[in-house]
C-alpha cells in the first residue's frame, strides 16, 4: 500500500467485525464507559461487546435497570443495595422481578449473587438454566430449620450445565455439600472447578471422608480449593492417605489448594503438633497429579523433612508455577551445590513459605539460584532469615522479582526488610512489610525512589504509629496508587492512645495515592462504656482516622474495629465527622454498621457519590432490626446522597 493513503484511512473504515474485536479486547470498565460516549456507533459496539457487569444500585429502583447490556454473560448481583438484604423480598411478586432480570440480561452464564435464603436461589437459578459458573455469597447465619443441603438444591435442580461452583464466601455447613453433590451425579461429573475454601475461622474444615466423597463424585475437577482439618487429634483429620486417594479421584487437577481451618485465624497455637503426613506418601501424591500448575498446602501442623518430596515435585509436576507451603519443615537444606528440595523447582514463578522454622539464609540463597524465574515471593514466620540473606536473595532475582511479602519474621523489621529489598527497589510493584519500628537508629534522610511501586500493604500493631514509615526508607513512591493497612491488637490492654493521631496525614508524601483499605477488623475494644482508665472505641477510631481529611484518597474501604463481647462493629461519631471532611473521597465502603444520623453526616462531603455499608464478616448481624442501619435508613440515606441539592463534581 502506498504510504500516502494511510492519512485518509479513518478508524471507521475498519470493517465492523474487526472494530468489534478491538472493542472486546478492552476490559477496563471506566475506559469502556468513556468509549461508549464517543458516538452512537461506538455506543452500540461497546454494548454489544460488554461481557461483564456489576449492578450496584438499590433494588427498589428497578425502573432504572439498564436493558441495553444484552450481551453480558457475567453478572454480579452481590453488591446491590440494601446490601445483604434478601434480594427479591422487597417485592410482592418476586418471580416478576427475577424475570425482569432475565429479560435485561438474557445471555448470562456466570452469576454472583447474595443468597440470603433458598427462595432467592430458586428464583434466580430458574431464570438462567444455562448457568455454568455460580458464586454464592452469604455472611448471615443459616435458617435454623432448613434441612441439610437445602440451600444448594435449587441450583443443582435448575442448572444442569453447572461446571464451576464457588461457595467460599457462602456461610453454610460442611455437611451441606456432599449429599447434594452425590444426588446430582451428572452435574458432579462435569464440575471442573469447586471452591469450598472458607474465609472465616469460625466454621469447621471439611473432614477426610467428606472431601473424599465429594472428589469421588467429581473426577473431572481441574481446580479444587478447600478448607480442611489437618489436626490429627480431630476425628476425620486429613492424613497422607486422604491426599493420595484425593489425587487418584481427581487426576486432572491443575490447581489444588488445601488449607487447615486454623490458617485463617489469628490465634497463636501453643504447641504445634505434627501433621499425619509423611514425605514419602507426599511424593506419591505429587506423582499422581502430573498436570499441577498451582499447589497450596497450608497445613498448620508440622510436616517434616520435606525436601525429598519437593524434589519429586520438580520431575512429576513439570508445569508447576505457583507453590505455597505452610508449616513445611526442611524444604531446602541449602548445603552447597547442586541445589536440593524446593530449590530444584526451576519453573516456579510464585513461591510462598510460611512458618518454616528451619529455613536458613543459606537455603534461601539456594532457592534464589534454583528458582530463577520467581516474580512473586512471600515469607511469613521464618525466624532464621536475616537481612543479609534476604538481600542476596533479591539481588539474585533482581531481573524477575516484582512482588514481595515479608511478615512475622523476627529478624526482619520494617527498616531491615526495606534494606533487603534495595536491589529491586527500582523494579518492585507490590510490597508487604510489617511496621515494626523497633530499631530505627539512623533515619534515612536521602530520598529513596521506589519508582514502580504501585501497591503497598502494611501490618501494624494497635497503638503503634504510622509516621516512621517515610523515615524508614519508603519516602519516594511516585507511582503508589493503593495502600492497605491492617491494624491488629487488643486496645483493652492499653489505657489510651499516647498521641493524637495514628499518622494517616503522613501519607500525603505519596502523590499518586488514591485508594486505601484501612482494616481495623483485628482491633478489639470497648464499644460501650469503657472501665475507668480505659478508652472506648470511638476515641481509638478518632486516633486511627485523624489526618484523613488531608489525604487525596478517592476510594476508601474501611473495616471498623469491634467489640467482641457485644458483637458490635460500627462507625462512631468522630469517624463520621472526619470522613465527611475528606474532600476528595468519591467512594466509601464501610464494613460494619452505622447509625442513620451518623451516615447523614457523610452527606456534608460534597464529593462523595457512592457509599455502602457491608456487613461482610461473620456473623453478619442476624436480624436487620437489631442493626443500627435498617433497610429504611439505607434507602433514606441513598435518596439524600442522590438528591438534586448535591452537585457531585465529575
Ligand atoms: C505461623 O505463622 C503465623 C503468621 O502467618 C504466626 O501468626 C504464627 O505464630 C506462626 N506460628 C509459629 C509456630 O511460628
Ligand atoms: C524516580 O524514578 C523515576 C523513573 O526512574 C523518574 O522518572 C523519577 O524522576 C524519579 N524521581 C525522583 C524524585 O528521583
Ligand atoms: C499517577 O496515576 C495516574 C492515573 O492512575 C497515571 O496515569 C500516572 O501515570 C501515575 N503517575 C505515576 C508517576 O505513576
Ligand atoms: C427478628 O426481627 C423480627 C421482626 O422484628 C422479630 O419478630 C424476630 O423475633 C427477630 N428475630 C431474632 C432472632 O431476633
Ligand atoms: C438521582 O437523581 C436524579 C436527578 O435528581 C434522578 O433523575 C434519578 O432518578 C435519581 N436516582 C435515583 C436512583 O433515585
Image (cartoon, rainbow, N blue to C red):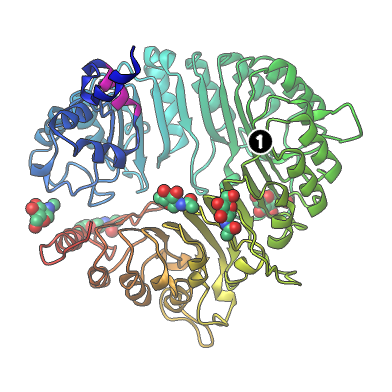
Say whether residue 17 is left or right of residue 485: left
**Label 1 Cα crowd, 10 Å radius (few <14 / some 14-19 / many 20+):** some
Residue under the point 61% across and 56% down? 449
Q: Can residue 618 be seen at all in this image of the molecule?
A: no
Residue under the point 73% across and 21% down? 314
Which residue is nearer to you in this view: 568 or 224?
A: 224
Above-or-below relation of 220 to 536: above
Query: Quadrant of residue 29 in the image?
Result: top left
Task: Report the residue that reaches farthest toward the bottom.
Answer: 532
Q: Can residue 116 be seen at all in this image of the molecule?
A: yes
Majority secondary structure in the magenta region: helix
Residue under the point 15% across and 28% down? 41
Q: Position of residue 117 (x, y in %)?
A: 27, 40
Say whether residue 65 is left or right of residue 141: left
Q: Which residue is mark 1?
A: 400
Q: Position of residue 155 (x, y in %)?
A: 30, 26
Q: Position of residue 238 (x, y in %)?
A: 64, 31
Above-or-below relation of 535 to 8: below
Above-or-below relation of 639 to 380: below
Query: Quadrant of residue 54 in the image?
Result: top left
Query: Quadrant of residue 319 in the image?
Result: top right
Residue under the point 49% across and 14% down? 220
Q: Which residues are magenta?
A: 18-25
Which residue is nearer to you in this view: 213 or 106?
A: 106
Q: Is residue 422 magenta?
A: no
Q: Position of residue 431 (x, y in %)?
A: 60, 50
Which residue is nearer to you in this view: 256 or 22?
A: 22
Amino acid at each position: 500500500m502506498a504510504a500516502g493513503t494511510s492519512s485518509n484511512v479513518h478508524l471507521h473504515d475498519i470493517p465492523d467485525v474487526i472494530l468489534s474485536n478491538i472493542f472486546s479486547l478492552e476490559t477496563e470498565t471506566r475506559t469502556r464507559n468513556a468509549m461508549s460516549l464517543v458516538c452512537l456507533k461506538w455506543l452500540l459496539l461497546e454494548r454489544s461487546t460488554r461481557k461483564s457487569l456489576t449492578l450496584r444500585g438499590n433494588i427498589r429502583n428497578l425502573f432504572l435497570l439498564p436493558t441495553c447490556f444484552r450481551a453480558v454473560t457475567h453478572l454480579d448481583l452481590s453488591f446491590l443495595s440494601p446490601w445483604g438484604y434478601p434480594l427479591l423480598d422487597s417485592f410482592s411478586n418476586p418471580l416478576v422481578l427475577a424475570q425482569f432480570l432475565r429479560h435485561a440480561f438474557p445471555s448470562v452464564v456466570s452469576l454472583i449473587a447474595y443468597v440470603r435464603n433458598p427462595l432467592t436461589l430458586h428464583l434466580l437459578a430458574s431464570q438462567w438454566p444455562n448457568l455454568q459458573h455460580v458464586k454464592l455469597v452469604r455472611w448471615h447465619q443459616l435458617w435454623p430449620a432448613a434441612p441439610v443441603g437445602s440451600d444448594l438444591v435449587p441450583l443443582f435442580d435448575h442448572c444442569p450445565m453447572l461446571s464451576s461452583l464457588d461457595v467460599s464466601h457462602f456461610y453454610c455447613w460442611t455437611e451441606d455439600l456432599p449429599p447434594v453433590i452425590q444426588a446430582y451425579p451428572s452435574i458432579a461429573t462435569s464440575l471442573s472447578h469447586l471452591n469450598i475454601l472458607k474465609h472465616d475461622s469460625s466454621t469447621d474444615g471439611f473432614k477426610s471422608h467428606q472431601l473424599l466423597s465429594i472428589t469421588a463424585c467429581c473426577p473431572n475437577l481441574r481446580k479444587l480449593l478447600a478448607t480442611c482439618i489437618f489436626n490429627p487429634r480431630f476425628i476425620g483429620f486429613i492424613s497422607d492417605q486422604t491426599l493420595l486417594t484425593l489425587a487418584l479421584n481427581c487426576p486432572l487437577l491443575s490447581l489444588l489448594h488445601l488449607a487447615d481451618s486454623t490458617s485463617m485465624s489469628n490465634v497463636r497455637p501453643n504447641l504445634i503438633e505434627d501433621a499425619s503426613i509423611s514425605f514419602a506418601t507426599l511424593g506419591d501424591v505429587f506423582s499422581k497429579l502430573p498436570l499441577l500448575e498451582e499447589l497450596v498446602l497450608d497445613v498448620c501442623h508440622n510436616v517434616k523433612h520435606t525436601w525429598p518430596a519437593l524434589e519429586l515435585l520438580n520431575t512429576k509436576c513439570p508445569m508447576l508455577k505457583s507453590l505455597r507451603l505452610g508449616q513445611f519443615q526442611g524444604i531446602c537444606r541449602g548445603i552447597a551445590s547442586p541445589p536440593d528440595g524446593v530449590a530444584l523447582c526451576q519453573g516456579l514463578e510464585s513461591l510462598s513459605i510460611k512458618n518454616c522454622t528451619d529455613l536458613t539464609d543459606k537455603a534461601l540463597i539456594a532457592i534464589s539460584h534454583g528458582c530463577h524465574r520467581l516474580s512473586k515471593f512471600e515469607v511469613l514466620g521464618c525466624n532464621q532469615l536475616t537481612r543479609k540473606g534476604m538481600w542476596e536473595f533479591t539481588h539474585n532475582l533482581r531481573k524477575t522479582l516484582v512482588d514481595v511479602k515479608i511478615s512475622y519474621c523476627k529478624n526482619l523489621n520494617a527498616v531491615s526488610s526495606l534494606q533487603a529489598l534495595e536491589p529491586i527497589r527500582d523494579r518492585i510493584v507490590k510490597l508487604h512489610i510489617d511496621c515494626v519500628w523497633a530499631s530505627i537508629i539512623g533515619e534515612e534522610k536521602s530520598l529513596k525512589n521506589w519508582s514502580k511501586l504501585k501497591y503497598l500493604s502494611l501490618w501494624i500493631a494497635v497503638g503503634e504509629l504510622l509516621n516512621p514509615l517515610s523515615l524508614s526508607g519508603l519516602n519516594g513512591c511516585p507511582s503508589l496508587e493503593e495502600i492497605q493497612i491492617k491494624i491488629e491488637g487488643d486496645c483493652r490492654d492499653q489505657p489510651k492512645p499516647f498521641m493524637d493521631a495514628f499518622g494517616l496525614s503522613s501519607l500525603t508524601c505519596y502523590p499518586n495515592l488514591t485508594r486505601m483499605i484501612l482494616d481495623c477488623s483485628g482491633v478489639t475494644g470497648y464499644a460501650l462504656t469503657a472501665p475507668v482508665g480505659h478508652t472506648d472505641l470511638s476515641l481509638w477510631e478518632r486516633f486511627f482516622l485523624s489526618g484523613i481529611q488531608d489525604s487525596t484518597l478517592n476510594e476508601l474501604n474501611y473495616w471498623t474495629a469491634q467489640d467482641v463481647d457485644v458483637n458490635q462493629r460500627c462507625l462512631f461519631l468522630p469517624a463520621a465527622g472526619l470522613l465527611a471532611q475528606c474532600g476528595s473521597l468519591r467512594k466509601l465502603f464501610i464494613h460494619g454498621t452505622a447509625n442513620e444520623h451518623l451516615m447523614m453526616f457523610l452527606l456534608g462531603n460534597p464529593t462523595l457519590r457512592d457509599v455502602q455499608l457491608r456487613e461482610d464478616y461473620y456473623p453478619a448481624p442476624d436480624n436487620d432490626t437489631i442493626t443500627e442501619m435498617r433497610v429504611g435508613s439505607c434507602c433514606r440515606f441513598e435518596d439524600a446522597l442522590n438528591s438534586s441539592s448535591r452537585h457531585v463534581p465529575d
